[in-house]
Image (spheres, helix red, strand yellow):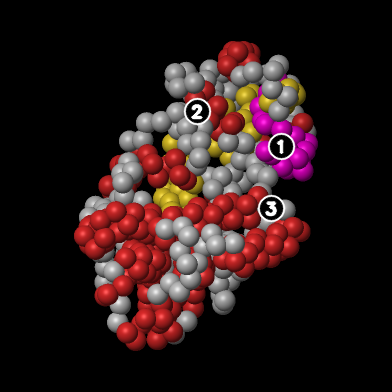
């Protein structure tokens, strides 16, 4: 496909090349439409379902009315005089024709004209703009990104009416040819980071981005398997993306993905959510501090509880009530690990449960997991209480990856504490601190980097 073959003035040669390259007979959605324009043969190539039928009908109607004596000598004059449409471009090689065709652009070959005319009357199947389920806000706008990159850039442009807002379009993937928009404010962005990011995007050598945004993230930065903390911040809200652009950050939009990738980022950016932009400073600081405290507790609550139960003499008398009162039939470490897996099982079951059944099944699961599991002797009520807090506290994090990163840190703390007592707990704490402090983002900055604007 990337041979760079030039388009000649012969329509027969152009259509012959196109029909040999494309599976016209096998694929029902690849359409070739031949018609006479000014007593010259012409051929339209387009993909069924990706163009606007009304616009195509009006365009063909205008072209069929052209007479022989009205046909200009050059293709540029033909584009100016004969095609009543706004987005029209001249293409000189077949590689660009195929790229535009597969993107939904209609391509026109006219006998006697050297080149192809790309008419961008495409439309993509897309869902309506609505508020994201995961990234909700108590105040502010109720729109969210969709799977079409042009619609997403339009929602950002609507909020930032500035000549400094730049949206560069790049293409990644030899087969998928996925469109990627690099958005930034040229008067605020860090030029070094922007150049480095642009170079990394252009240097990606892959056949496809099969999982869109996640595939792009893996191509940009190879993840270290032993460090689960996220390298990027994602949002499905255009107002959050616009706010980050004003802060000098770079936003990546990937076609077919309903979220934006924001970088550079730090752990303070990751735990940030949309509500932080809509509340006064004092309220915003309190909410961020509360999320930070809860995140801290999700990591250390159950490991500290396990450590104290292994060393009851460390427990102050005023906190003696936290000790397990009932008989321990199953070691506490196994209770905690079983509940960790059980909670994830319930979460996965909730994702795959029909919405009409989710509420009754949640009630049944809560009763079985809560009351009967304690009465049966499998779990102690104190363990159930602390694991219930951890399960609910995970949902205070707007970032899904960060929630599981905290979970993995908690699991390694539990296992090390159970195996080596306080020495294991200390080693686990060092691992947690090192995982955060030595985690590098795409920009090369530390995960704890704070940028002051």
Front residue (pair 351, 269): 351
Q: Is 57 in the magenta?
A: yes
Please state if 180 lies on the left or on the right of 447 as rendered: right
How many neighbours does mark 3 have within 10 angstroms: few (below 14), some (14-19), or many (20 or more)?
Answer: some
Q: Earlier in the sequence, mark 2 or mark 3?
A: 2
Q: Which mark is residue 353?
A: 3
Q: Say if 38 sits above or below 164 in the image.
A: above
Q: Say if 230 sits above or below 256 in the image.
A: below
Q: Is 363 in the magenta?
A: no
Q: How many marks?
A: 3
Give the residue number, with chain letter if any, for mark 2. 175
Q: Say if 377 sits above or below 148 in the image.
A: below
Please state if 128 lies on the left or on the right of 101 as rendered: right
Q: Which residues are magenta?
A: 40-62
Q: Position of residue 144 (x, y in %)?
A: 58, 61
Please state if 270 lies on the left or on the right of 74 as rendered: left
How many neighbours does mark 1 have within 10 angstroms: few (below 14), some (14-19), or many (20 or more)?
Answer: some
Front residue (pair 419, 49): 419
Q: Secondary structure at mark 3?
A: loop
Q: Position of residue 53 (x, y in %)?
A: 76, 40
Q: Position of residue 129 (x, y in %)?
A: 64, 59
Q: Position of residue 241 (x, y in %)?
A: 46, 62
Which residue is located at x 71 percent, y 16 percent?
25
Residue 100 location, quadrant: top right
Residues under numbered marks 1 and 2 in contact, where contact means CB atoms less than 8 Å apart: no
Q: Secondary structure at mark 2?
A: loop
Q: Which mark is residue 49?
A: 1
Task: Tell me if I can see residue 130 in this picture.
Answer: no
Disc 2 to disc 3, how far (Cα)?
35 Å
């Amino acid at each position: 496909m990337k041979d760079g073959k030039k388009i000649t003035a012969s329509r027969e040669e152009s259509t012959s090349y196109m029909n040999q390259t494309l599976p016209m007979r096998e694929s029902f959605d690849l359409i070739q439409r031949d018609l006479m324009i000014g007593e010259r043969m012409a051929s339209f190539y387009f993909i069924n379902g990706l163009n606007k039928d009304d616009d195509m009908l009006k365009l063909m109607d205008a072209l069929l009315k052209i007479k022989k004596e009205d046909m200009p000598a050059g293709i540029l004059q033909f584009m100016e005089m004969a095609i009543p449409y706004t987005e029209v471009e001249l293409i000189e090689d077949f590689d660009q024709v195929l790229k535009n065709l597969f993107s939904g652009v209609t391509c026109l070959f006219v006998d006697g004209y050297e080149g192809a005319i790309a008419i961008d009357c495409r439309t993509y199947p897309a869902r309506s703009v609505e508020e994201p389920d995961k990234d909700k806000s108590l105040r502010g706008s109720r729109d969210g990104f969709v799977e079409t990159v042009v619609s997403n850039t339009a929602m950002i442009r609507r909020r930032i009416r500035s000549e400094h807002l730049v949206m560069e379009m790049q293409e990644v993937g030899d087969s998928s040819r996925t469109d990627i928009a690099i958005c930034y404010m040229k008067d605020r962005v860090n030029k070094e980071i922007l150049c480095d990011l642009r170079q990394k995007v252009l240097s990606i050598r892959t056949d496809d981005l099969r999982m869109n945004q996640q595939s792009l993230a893996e191509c940009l930065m190879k993840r270290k398997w032993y460090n689960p903390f996220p390298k990027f911040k994602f949002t499905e809200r255009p107002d959050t993306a616009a706010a980050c652009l004003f802060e000098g950050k770079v936003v990546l939009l990937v076609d077919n993905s309903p979220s934006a990738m924001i970088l550079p980022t730090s752990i303070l950016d990751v735990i940030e959510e949309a509500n932080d932009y809509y509340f006064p400073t004092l309220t915003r600081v309190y909410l961020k501090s509360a999320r930070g405290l809860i995140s801290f507790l999700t990591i250390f609550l159950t490991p500290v509880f396990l450590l104290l139960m292994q060393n009851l003499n460390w427990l102050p008398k005023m906190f003696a009530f936290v000790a397990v009162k009932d008989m321990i039939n199953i070691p506490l470490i196994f209770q905690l690990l079983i509940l960790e897996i059980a909670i994830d099982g319930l979460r996965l079951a909730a994702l795959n449960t029909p919405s009409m059944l989710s509420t009754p099944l949640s009630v049944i699961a809560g009763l079985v997991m809560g009351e009967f599991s304690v009465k049966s002797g499998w779990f102690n009520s104190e363990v159930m209480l602390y694991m219930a807090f951890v399960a609910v506290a995970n949902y205070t994090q707007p970032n899904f990856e960060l929630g599981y990163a905290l979970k993995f840190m908690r699991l390694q703390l539990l296992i090390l504490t159970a195996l080596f007592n306080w020495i294991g707990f200390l080693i686990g704490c060092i691992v947690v601190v090192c995982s955060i402090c030595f985690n590098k983002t795409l920009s090369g900055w530390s995960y704890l980097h704070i940028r002051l604007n």
